[in-house]
Image (spheres, coloured by chain):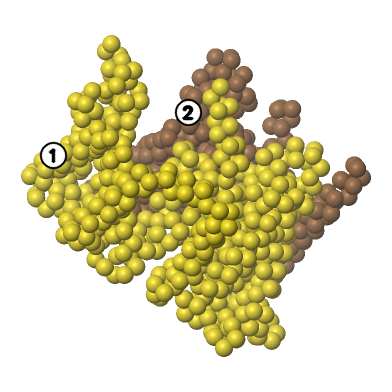
Chain colours: A brown, B yellow
Amino acid sequence: MLYRLRRKISGTTVFMWIIGLGILAMVVVGSAQTLASGRYPSDQWLVLTIYGVAQGSVYALIALGYTMVYGILRMINFAHSEVFMSGPFIGYYVATALDEAGFLDRQPVIGLGIVLLAAMATSTTIAVLLERIAYRPLRRAPRLVPLITAIGASFFLQYTFRGLFGSGVKGYPEIDQLKGYWLIPGTQFGVLKTQGVVIVAAVIMLVGLYLFVQRTKTGKSLQAVSEDKDIAALMGIDVDRAIVITFIIGGALAGAAGVLYALLFRQVNFFMGFFPGIKAFTAAVLGGIGNVVGAMLGGLFLGIAESLFPNLVLDGLGIPAPYQLKDALAFILLVVVLIFRPTGILGERLAAKKA
Amino acid sequence: MRAQSRTPWSNTVRTGLLGGVAALLLSLVGLIEASAQRAIITGVLSMGHTLLLLIYVWAAQQAVRRLAADGERQPSRLETLTHGALAGLLISAVLAALVLLGQVINLRAVFINASPALFDLLTLKLGTWLGGGVLLVVGVVLGLLVASLSFIPSQFRKPLVLGLAAIPVVSVLASALFAIRGLSLLGALILLVLVAAASYLWDLKKGAVRERMNNLTPTGQRTTRWLRWLLPAVIVLLLPLLGKYPSEVLDNVGLYILMGLGLNIVVGFAGLLDLGYVAFFALGAYTMGVLTSPEIQWAGARLTFWEALPFSVLVATISGILLGIPVLGMRGDYLAIVTLGFGEIIRLVALSDWLKPYIGGSNGITRIPKAVVGPIELATPQTLYYLIILGCLVVAFVTIRVKDSRLGRAWMAVREDEDVAQAMGIDLVRTKLLAFATGAAFSGLSGAIFASKLTSIYPHSFHLLVSINVLCLIIVGGMGSIPGVIVGSLALVGLPELLREFSEYRLMMYGAALVFMMLNRPEGLMPEARRKLELHEAEGGAGE
């Protein structure tokens, strides 16, 4: 019987390995051809990489929300993309009001801080409400039930925002001080100021979160709850409180990520959460879901991969307009990771600890 | 004593405020204003007002029921009335506050739907102060009316409620189907009386009719049973006589029933949450397009609809298996995301310039021929309807036959517990792949008919939202239940198409419906018996 089982497994595994090797071959051939053709100067790769890092750090911030909620509730908070969208959406109204008063250009740091706070407050409120209304009653329901609820909540939020604020794309005001480049000393190479700010802000928040989770008592209680809810409760940890805190942190980070995203792309609309949300989830899976550091690394990796791959791989394969396939690439990466390494890059440590 | 009497009050306040928030939300997203265009009773009641009315009824009813359920003693009539009135008042208070705020600051700068028209609707065009006052009074009166309903003996209450409910239902159906602008006041009253009388009489005579049925001879019973099937069948066959537009709507409903029955096998029977279901729909449609459209040169001789149909289904089935293999080992929520990814990959690839020479990119494929039966070209929605009905019948027949077969039972075993199912000797790989393949085949069939119905297909038609629509309808209808799929399609696809003003809010309501169903009635409107048992068993288990 074992023999028969092995034979069956190998049938599908072989198929999967063929897919995997095919993809790998495409990546290698594509990059080799692009690099050999020398179509892009090295400067351009650097520009793309920095853009990727900026975008990736936004993904990392969103991914933390997915990964922490998954770690603690074992559910994919599908509505997290709407938590992410709601922050900059409300932030937009604050930002335009500040901009019209001229405050945003006079005091960009304080102004941005206010926008950031408004966005984080909105996202946090929505995340907490979601948990309270939609997820808490279902904590012991069969697995699919909370997921379907989350999908429903996601669409409800999206289209409620559309109904409340209209379906048009809203342009974020531009801050005078953030126009142009910072030249890297000693080179002729400049970094877009907005990208620089996004990277710095994201790194500060990521480090802050890491220290919070690792060093503080509350952070440790979160870890304990995600390890084992029942035993954590026996140790005197208020599980409900820990879950609410998780949603608060996830919401606040998503709101902040939303403002950074709006700084990069300077626009918001009701559907903006979907793709970043899926990509951030991909990042969380990439890093091993449930793993905080993994989500950060996964986000950065995905951001860089996304900005480099269309030019590096697809161009080399002779696919026209490779940029159109950027979003598909993230999905392909997600599918490949889940198939070949469902535990993610850093997932093993977590799995080993659990065993 | 104090602590005891506080709970009912806070309950009522909560219910009232909740109703207020719901009313506020409906107003601010523009639903009330949009649906005010449609009259329920001409000149008296618009649909916008009806929606608000429903919120009042719900809140007051909820407050009264909670009061009766929570208290240890029967609440007095005065208490019931005050609680109902309070709930109504609170809703009105929230709305009045909105109107007042709208006068003070320009809400429209943020909430695009906070328009003067909305305020006119809420204040009944009486101006801010008078209208606000009237709004509060109306709230109290409505609360009192609903609360006093509970004093009417139940044999009269039910006919009355049914009669009242029939007015908006009939009016909406009539105005959507026959371009009538709402019922007249007299018509509404007649309808109320008729429905109430019918319901009252039925309640009186129900027992007698049942008894007569049971006393019939066996042949008589058999004929009545036949009649019971024959009547709906005749009605279904005659539906296209309603005209072109209703047939169009029914065609869409039918296509969703096809997809719903397919996804029902994957999600409802086998418990594999597939969010990329639209991929197979797209593949079916694109195969039909590529094989039949004269625009496509690279795919050999042009086929007719009937020749291409098997290929559509075949391509969808094979891709169902191919996409199923990689996800075999995945658990519920990972599976959902990966399948979602598959669906989006297919759409994005179809949209890109890469495959443009073959499948048209964002220009799609046009000039797909219609299906031809003998001398008749199925060009009108009315004729196409019969093709779709035929498809639905075939698919429903297959589903019903498979459901209780060895395979169907294996699916349900996998749904309940994979490990135990495997231990029982069920081949997981084969069972899961068959579920994916069957579901994909149905979806491909639906896609093929869709392509020939529209004669042109674009990647935009295959958005993720289609998958979500199908998922919604099987969940609202009841996962795993075949009548549920039909009811779900009628409710979620048919109704919004009939009520055009709702189409913009469709997804908002779908989302709300999903959350609401999962929280309150996870088994759906027309539950499958076994599933209902399971879900409530789980609830009972959790409660202990």
Amino acid type at circle 1 is Val
- Which residue does the numbered mark 1 point to in the structure image? B137
Of A168 and B458, nearer the camera is B458
Chain at tag 2: A
* Lateral position of residue B412 relative to residue B382, left or right: right
Amino acid type at circle 2 is Ile
Chain at tag 1: B
Q: Is residue A138 above or below residue A42?
A: above
Measured as percent of width and height from the top left, residue A2 is found at 90, 42
Residue at the spot 74% in from the left edge and 27% down from the top edge: A355
Residue at the spot 55% in from the left edge and 31% down from the top edge: B539
* Lateral position of residue A313 relative to residue A116, left or right: right
Residue at the spot 57% in from the left edge and 50% down from the top edge: B481
2 and 1 marks on the same chain? no
Which structural element holds mark 2? helix
Total number of numbered labels?
2
Instruction: Kindly tell me whether residue B26 is visible in this rendering.
Output: no
Measured as percent of width and height from the top left, residue A204 is found at 50, 36
Which structural element holds mark 1? helix
- Give the position of the N terminus of chain B as an image quadrant: top left
Of A198 and B441, nearer the camera is B441
Q: Residue furthest top?
A: B1
- Give the position of the C terminus of chain B as an image quadrant: top right
Crowdedness near tag 1: few (<14), some (14–19) or many (≥20) residues, C-alpha within 10 Å: some
Measured as percent of width and height from the top left, residue A51 is found at 53, 54
- Which residue does the numbered mark 2 point to in the structure image? A245
Crowdedness near tag 2: few (<14), some (14–19) or many (≥20) residues, C-alpha within 10 Å: some
Q: In this view, does B476 lie above or below B187?
A: above
Residue at the spot 91% in from the left edge and 43% down from the top edge: A1
Of B251 and A279, nearer the camera is B251
